[in-house]
Amino acid sequence: MKFVDEAEIKVAAGKGGNGCLSFRREKYIERGGPDGGDGGDGGSVFMQADVALNTLVDFRFQPQYRAQAGQPGQGRNCTGAGGDDLLIKVPVGTSVIDVNTEELIADLNNPDEAVMVARGGFHGMGNTRFKSSTNRAPRKTTNGTLGETRTLQLQLRLVADVGLLGYPNAGKSTLIRAVSAAKPKVADYPFTTLVPNLGVVSLGMERSFVMADIPGLIEGASEGVGLGFRFLKHLSRTRLLLHLIDVLPADNSDPIESARQIVRELEKFSPTLAKKERVIVLNKIDLLSDEELSELESALVSELAWTDPIFKISAISKQGCDELCQHLMQSIESHRENLTKDEEYRDSQNQLEREMAFEIRRTIESAKSNRRNDEDNWDEDWDD
């Protein structure tokens, strides 16, 4: 199945049923009076997170959704049937944004979490509602109101605890294979990873976390170069970022400059995302001597003004991986405990999520607009 993480759809709630104008007409009963019933309420549109889904590809083929309208009222004070609600299922981790108002309607981060995205119309009232001591034969009714109509943008951002960050061939896929049961493709050429991969890292009973591997980043990724902004957004829901640095790149590039470039791309894409906790890991340490590795680590600390510990691993031989995973697990457990017990911390995290969602959307829309303008200019130059 093709991995699709963005879609734009239109949803329309059902119209409320009209009220009925009716009078009781039975043999031997004079002046039976009004008996027009109310209409039924229109159906609403809901979205629900479903763990069985992992892509938004279905919304590319069916972009319009409409809930059922309410039925009109009938005589004998019969109320019209209400319209059935429409339930749309989306993957866990989907953000729902109103395109016209740029309102973040919901972040569906938990399984079976549901939210109303369009409210159904209110029912019309039959003429029975308007009878009184001075108006015994009312001919007044009301029509049902229209249901809400919205254009929504769906953004799928994978829910994971740790996000792998680094240049192509830094060893991200090798690492996730070494510490989990995930089996992403590994090869000796760039961009072997074309879609995000998730792996569960287990460290014993009830101690595990999810690691996300996204395609490698290159210069200009925040502007759409390579596979850039399509997958950068998947890092926003992670607890922390694992910045993997190849100590001996195949193209002889400077590892420190590569690390700086990754940070710059993060800041361009989302300043809030760039502030997320980051762990630096030197990979492929078996390719350098202890002295060379120590020099690289010292230079990295100096150039990046880094104060936290730097982990050194060889993903292919699993050297240092256990120590790294234990450190990640402790950080994640502390985060989970704070989310449960500290309301202020939980609110701050939710606010960061909302800020990142809007920053990411603005960056992506701006990059797409710039790309369309470049294509139009290229076409004009070609015609000239």
Image: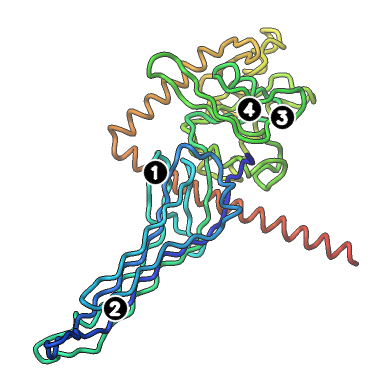
Q: Which one is closest to the eye, mark 1 or mark 4? A: 1
Residue 99 locus on image (x, y percent): 52, 61
How many numbered discs sit on the rendered protein? 4
Report the amino acid beneath label 3. Answer: Thr
- Which-is-in-front pick, marks 2 and 1? 2
Q: Which residue is mark 1?
A: 350
Q: Are marks 1 and 4 in contact (CB under 8 Å)?
A: no
Q: Disc 2 and disc 1: Cα gap in Å?
A: 44 Å
Report the side of 200 relative to 194 (left or right): left
Secondary structure of the residue carrying numbered label 3: loop
Q: Earlier in the sequence, mark 4 or mark 3?
A: 3
> If you read the primary sequence from the N terminus, does the residue marked by circle 3 or circle 2 appear first?
2
Front residue of 328 and 36:
36
Q: In the rendered view, would you say 178 is above or below 90? A: above
Determine the CA span between mark 2 and mark 4: 74 Å
Identify the residue position indicated by label 3 in the image. Answer: 192
User: Helix, strand, or loop for circle 2?
Assistant: loop
The residue beneath circle 2 is 19
Query: In this figure, which residue is indicated by the disc labeled 4?
Result: 303
